[in-house]
Amino acid sequence: MSGDLDSFRDAVIDDINVDACRLLVVGINPGLWTAKVGAPFARPGNRFWPALHEAGITPRLVDAREGLCDDDLRMLARVGLGFTNVVARATARAGELSDEEIRAGGRILDDKVARQREARGGPEIVMVAGIGAFRTAFGAKTADGEPVAVGKQDREIGGAETWVVPNPSGLNAHETVASLARAYHEVWERLG
């Protein structure tokens, strides 16, 4: 299986529903499993989809391990969710990305969100899954010069209110589905 996944290294998956979303979910970059099936947070064991459902954002649990079906895509559009990444290039681990690649991805993301907000008025909120990538992409510090923490940020992305939530990867072992769901729910409540 891993040899099969290696063939997806450097692949790019399409954004999902960026044009019409209220909440844009931003991953660090696609993993190889995600690139293989064309769905965000698709690797078995990733806690994103269970946490999203437990947070009350999706009406049912999405199983993205084999990709998103048409019913999933329609439901995500109805709910108002869109998906993109800081860096479009698929890797086995986010640690394979250079800081410059992440900073360049941050500039692209800023422009992408600004264009969508100008053209369509949304997204209202950008939710970045991963504090390390956010710090690297945006050189993010608080007004007091301290490194940013998870939660609502002073810095906007493309003019949209920006939140950082913990990375749902299984490598972020101290987070649980329940703790991720609490973070996601806080962002969702902010949308009203």
Image (cartoon, rainbow, N blue to C red):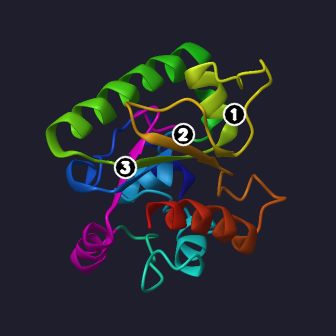
* In magenta segment, residue 135: no
In the depicted structure, whether residue 15 falls above or below residue 71 = above
What segment is highlighted magenta in the picture?
68-91
Q: Residue at x 61, y 38 (%)?
A: 153
For the residues labelled 1 and 3, the Cα–Cα distance comes to 23 Å
**Relative to 153, is 188 on the left or the right?**
left
Name which residue type carries label 3.
Answer: Glu
Quadrant where the C terminus lies? bottom left
Of badges 1 and 3, the one in the foreground is 3
Identify the residue position indicated by label 2 in the image.
28
Q: Pointer 1 and pointer 3: residues touching (CB < 8 Å)?
A: no
* 1 or 3: tag closer to the N-terminus: 3
Disc 2 element: loop
Nearest to the observer: residue 145 or residue 47 = 145
Circle 3 packing at 10 Å, graded few (<14), some (14-19), many (20+), is some
For the residues labelled 3 and 2, the Cα–Cα distance comes to 20 Å
Q: Pointer 1 and pointer 2: residues touching (CB < 8 Å)?
A: yes
Disc 1 element: helix
Which numbered tag is attached to residue 124?
3
* In magenta segment, residue 86: yes
Circle 2 packing at 10 Å, graded few (<14), some (14-19), many (20+), is many
In the depicted structure, whether residue 69 falls above or below residue 91 = below
Name which residue type carries label 2.
Answer: Ile
Identify the residue position indicated by label 1 in the image.
132
Name which residue type carries label 1.
Answer: Gly
Q: Residue at x 66, y 55 (%)?
A: 169
Disc 3 element: loop
For the residues labelled 1 and 2, the Cα–Cα distance comes to 9 Å
Q: Residue at x 25, y 39 (%)?
A: 117
Q: Position of residue 15 (x, y in %)?
A: 30, 47
Q: Quadrant of residue 128?
A: top right
* 3 or 2: tag closer to the N-terminus: 2
